[in-house]
Image (tube, rainbow, N blue to C red):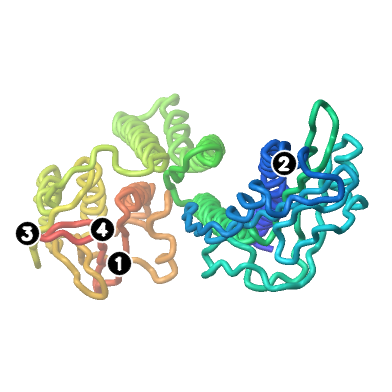
């Protein structure tokens, strides 16, 4: 299973379970809490009504009832009182309290219900029995299916149009005179009266919970995508480094950014060790030949030699010493370039000017070998590059061409833009020398690979082309070779360039 899918499933599981448990807890506690609040208000109401009924219940004759009393009239007036109250987003259009009063024996003496139970014995009901015993009396009993008071539209607070056995809460309070209980007042209210509030609140909780879950999942998707994208950037960086490309570590915040920096530091140390070992092996191999030549010349110089031979062997020592010095200097320069990740001082420079600057120091050699420089094309091209490195790369190509070009030949130079298959700026150099054997094409530009100079068995170090290739890589350019029949065509290409006022990249 891929990392992104694992992260998302893990986040989904945690967020989903958390949302489910939260909703279960909230919804599980909501209904009991509403009923507790409702019962609390009914306790206050029952005790208030008990105080209002005290005098008339105390004056009631034995076996009588409260029908026709002032208290009974006020209770009936309450039941018939019109009401239209907007409570937040709901509307209440009915008064839902049912009030009944019993005497000290539990006989009903007043009832405001739709089917009055006056005269019935309620002494067995918990609300009455417990109150008469001096305890808190309350019960919840399903009401019989019956038509209840209509409450209008779905946004109203009321009993409902047809409550099928809706539970009814009963809360009782004692009626006391001189510390003696003379009766019980019970206030009843159907749960359906607040059911719309409960339904609406539950619906809002569900909507909020599902919205929270959706937001959590969206955050989870965003975090997963960020994590996967970051890990893929790190993986791509590691793969590029594995292929030998020098890239800056991706800029990533947090611990992953620290990991990228640690990977880069580790790569630098490993590259440094590997590079040092490689350079040491290559330099040791290449120095064997000039050292052997110097040793041989030195041994001969220890003997008595004619002046001409002594001068010839001394000159050989100097020549081989210069060759080793040049090799070491070029190898150090190449090693420095290989440890860079890009040009150190990039600026917008003219490619033509860089070519002219590279040709100037070679004027004496060109004249000595009777070589002619001919421009086959000059287009105004400006590059974002390090001027010193660009001049060095072109100078190495020109020096290599001069070494292989026959006398009285021509070096053809071109600076321009190749627009197919994609726009690139280029510098091209063609000589009319012996060219390069087919078998050697794949090794051109590698360090310490070179072919013999014309008319000589002496080979160069091959570091000049290797330095040029490295400079091209630092500028995200390319060095390529092609046969010219006769000669060799060398081409430097760059993607980031400017022509007149237009920029291409």
Q: Spatial distance from mark 1 to mark 2, Cα to Cα? A: 130 Å
Location of mark 4 (residue): 404
At a point 63% along the width and 72% down the height, the residue shown is: 161
Q: Within 10 Å of the Cα at label 3, are there few (<14), some (14-19), or many (20+) other Cα atoms?
A: few
Left/right placement of residue 427 relative to residue 86 reads left
Q: Earlier in the sequence, mark 3 or mark 4?
A: 4
Q: Which mark is residue 500?
A: 3
Instruction: Check disc 1 and report the residue beneath it.
Output: 435
Q: In the rendered picture of this protein, how many numbered marks are placed on residues? A: 4
The quarter in which the C terminus is drawn is: bottom left
Q: Earlier in the sequence, mark 2 or mark 3?
A: 2
Position in image of residue 295 (x %, y %): 47, 32
Which one is earlier in the sequence, the residue at label 4 or at label 1?
4
Q: Where's the N terminus, which quadrant? A: bottom right
Image mark for residue 489: none
Disc 2 versus disc 3: distance between alpha carbons?
109 Å
Q: Residue at x 85, y 30 (%)?
A: 180
């Amino acid at each position: 299973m891929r990392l992104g899918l694992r992260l998302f499933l893990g986040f989904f599981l945690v967020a989903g379970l958390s949302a489910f448990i939260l909703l279960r807890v909230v919804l599980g506690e909501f209904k009991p809490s509403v009923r507790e609040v409702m019962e609390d208000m009914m306790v206050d109401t029952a005790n208030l009504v008990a105080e209002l009924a005290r005098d008339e219940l105390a004056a009631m004759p034995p076996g009588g009832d409260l029908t026709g009393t002032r208290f009974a009239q006020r209770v009936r007036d309450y039941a018939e009182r019109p009401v239209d109250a907007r409570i937040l987003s709901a509307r209440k259009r009915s008064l839902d309290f049912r009030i009944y009063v019993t005497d000290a024996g539990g006989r009903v003496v007043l009832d405001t219900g739709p089917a009055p139970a006056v005269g019935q014995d309620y002494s067995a009901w918990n609300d009455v029995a417990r109150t008469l015993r001096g305890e808190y009396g309350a019960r919840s009993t399903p009401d019989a299916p019956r038509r209840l008071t209509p409450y209008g539209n779905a946004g109203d607070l009321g009993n409902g149009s047809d409550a099928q056995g809706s539970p009814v809460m009963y809360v009782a309070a004692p009626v006391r005179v001189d510390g003696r209980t003379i009766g019980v007042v019970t206030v009843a209210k159907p749960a359906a009266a607040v059911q719309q509030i409960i339904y609406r609140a539950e619906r809002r909780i569900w909507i909020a919970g599902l919205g929270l879950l959706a937001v959590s999942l969206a955050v989870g998707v965003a975090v997963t995508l960020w994590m996967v994208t970051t890990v893929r950037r790190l993986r791509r960086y590691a793969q590029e480094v594995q292929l030998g490309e020098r890239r800056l570590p991706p800029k990533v915040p947090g611990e992953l950014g620290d990991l990228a920096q640690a990977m880069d530091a580790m790569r630098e140390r490993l590259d440094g060790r590997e590079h040092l070992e490689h350079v040491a092996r290559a330099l040791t191999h290449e120095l064997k030949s000039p050292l052997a030549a110097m040793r041989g010349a030195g041994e001969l110089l220890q003997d008595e030699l004619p002046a001409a031979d002594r001068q010839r062997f001394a000159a050989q020592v100097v020549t081989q010493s210069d060759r080793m010095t040049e090799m070491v200097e070029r190898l150090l320069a190449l090693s420095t370039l290989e440890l860079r990740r890009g040009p150190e001082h990039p600026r917008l420079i003219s490619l033509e000017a860089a070519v002219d600057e590279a040709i100037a120091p070679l004027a004496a050699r060109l004249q000595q070998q009777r070589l002619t420089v001919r421009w086959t094309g000059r287009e105004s091209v400006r590059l974002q590059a390090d001027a010193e490195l660009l001049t060095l790369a072109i100078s190495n190509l020109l020096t290599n061409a001069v070494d292989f070009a026959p006398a009285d030949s021509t070096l053809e130079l071109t600076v321009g833009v190749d627009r197919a298959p994609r726009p690139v700026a280029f510098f091209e150099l063609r000589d009319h020398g012996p060219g390069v054997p087919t078998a050697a094409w794949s090794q051109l530009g590698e360090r310490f690979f070179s072919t013999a100079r014309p008319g000589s068995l002496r080979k160069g170090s091959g570091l000049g082309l290797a330095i040029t290739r490295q400079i091209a890589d630092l500028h995200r350019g390319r060095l390529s070779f092609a046969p010219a029949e006769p000669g060799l065509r060398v081409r430097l290409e760059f993607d980031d360039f400017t022509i007149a006022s237009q920029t291409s990249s």
